[in-house]
Amino acid sequence: MNQSNCDFSPMKQTVKDELSQVIMSLQQSIEAMDTEANCLLSDFEKIKEKFITIEMQAATFYLNCYLSPFTEKYPELSNCVQNMSKRRHGGLIVIQREDALDSFLKPGIHIGADLTHSLLESIFFPGNPLHDGAVLVSHNKIVSAANVLPLSDIYTGEKKLGTRHRAAIGLSERSDALIMVVSEETGRISFAFNGNLHPITPHGIL
């Protein structure tokens, strides 16, 4: 994986600073336990939310690093998923990297068009016959739509993941592809890579 365009230093420093703040909060919570009247539940909730924020910031940075060597159109991808997130239009976008994907996909409909956010958004618009499957992107082109991906059997807690997220993880378990997902239920944006699913901040993808 080529990450020559990514400067990790600022991101690492930001994460270090924010983790230091979390450690300070944890230390304050430990000291507060000596006070019986103090309830720590709200402190725990704030610390948990901070960890989630740090994870999303780091994931957003790495997403840019993973995408930029393989497509010049990641600003278009960013605009697409942000607009879909606002409208809660579900979507599944596969960005091919080095591995061939033919043996892992059930092929959909050939598109063969330049990648633009408006075309991607129209494909995933509710009611479009192609909106339920995955779009395959290679370099700067939309190769095809309505592709079917292999599903992962992964669970999160007691709740089974939705089909889009299981499909994204399933393909990432079998290849080096990066798969972006927009949840129809919540509008949340995430990406699957190396068998893991990472939430990202909606406005920090570029």
Image: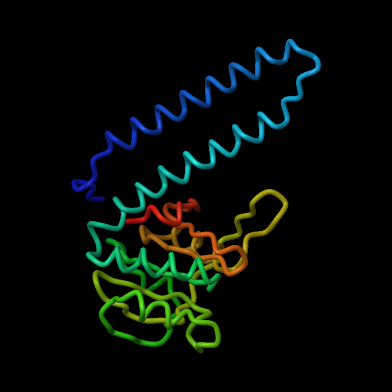
Q: Is residue 77 above or below residue 116?
A: above
| Picture layout, residue 4 above or below residue 91 | above
Give the side of residue 100 with respect to residue 173, left or right.
left
Q: Nearer the viewer, residue 71 or 41?
A: 41
Give the residue at x 41% y 55%.
203
Residue 187, x across and y down, in percent? 55, 64
Residue found at the very far right of the displayed protein: 37
Which residue sits at x=41%, y=76%?
135
Question: Residue 195: x percent and y percent?
Answer: 47, 53
* Residue pictured at 60% horizontal, 55% vertical: 154
Q: Nearer the viewer, residue 184 or 204?
A: 204
Point out the residue furthest to the left here: 4
Quadrant including the C terminus: bottom left
Where, by quadrant of the figure, is residue 17 drawn? top left
Q: Quadrant of residue 139?
A: bottom left
User: Is 150 located above or below residue 66 in the figure?
Assistant: below
- Residue at 32% across / 79% down in the picture? 143
